[in-house]
Amino acid sequence: MGPTQQYVMDEPLNLDSHFMQEALRQAWRAYDAAEVPVGAVVVRAGKIIGRAFNQVELLTDATAHAEMLALTQAQSAVGDWRLTDCTLYVTKEPCPMCAGALVHCRCARVVFGAPDPKGGAAGGALNLLQFPTLNHRCEITSGVRGEECTSLLRQFFSEQRTLNRALRHSRSVHRAGSNPPGGSEPRAPEEPDAS
Ligand SMILES: [Zn+2]
């Protein structure tokens, strides 16, 4: 995008859709790395100042959610832990950990794609982003490119299930034949708490 055409889109929804597309690009990077496909970008004054994808398996770190990594980048870029004039775009509704971080850094606005009624903390299972007794509340916009974000997650988990079935089958075939010594089994991500 050239400097002259920077964000001439006057409808906020188009702008949201544009930045969610960037978050989706990150989610696909997670997918390609066999991570739960969630991506996030942080935007300030129309510019992306943090972008990341979920890296829990790659970094062996349960806190390495896309939002956490993108927020850390954004705080470095701003030179301040306060992100009071920033918007975070994420492909899946933030979990309680990430919602807590968003409140801590006083993020102005959170836009997400896929809802998470079981584990989401932006109004799905609970709403930490607008919790009455906390000292900061984030504006929330949900369902931006929701279909794309949800179908990417569905595709990933469906493939994981197929993979697991194939693994179980191959192990049972192994057991029927010879018994290989101490084979460790690759662990599949768990759907409910992996984002
Ligand atoms: Zn999270």
Image (cartoon, rainbow, N blue to C red):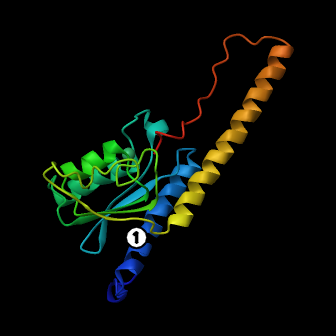
The image shows residue 60, relative to residue 149, as above or below, that is above
Q: How crowded is mark 1: few (under 14 residues within 10 Å), some or many (20 or more)?
A: many
Judge left or right: residue 127 versus residue 132. Answer: right
Q: Which residue appears at 73% of the width and 30% of the height?
A: 167
Q: Which residue appears at 36% of the width and 55% of the height?
A: 123
Q: Does the residue labelled 1 lie within 8 Å of ligand 1?
A: no
Q: Where does the image place residue 80, in percent across and percent down from the top left?
A: 14, 55
Judge left or right: residue 131 versus residue 175. Answer: left
Residue 111 sits in which quadrant?
Answer: bottom left
Q: Where does the image place residue 12, in percent across and percent down from the top left?
A: 34, 80
Q: Which of 131 and 136 is in front in this view?
A: 131
Judge left or right: residue 56 versus residue 154. Answer: left
Quarter of the figure that contains the C terminus: top left
Q: Which of 129 and 78 is in front in this view?
A: 129
Q: Nearer the viewer, residue 86 or 97?
A: 97
Residue 20 sits in which quadrant?
Answer: bottom left
Quarter of the figure that contains the N terminus: bottom left
Q: Mark 1 points at which residue?
A: 19
Q: Which residue appears at 34% of the width and 87% of the height?
A: 10
Question: Ligand 1 is in which quadrant of the figure?
Answer: top left
Judge left or right: residue 116 versus residue 139. Answer: right
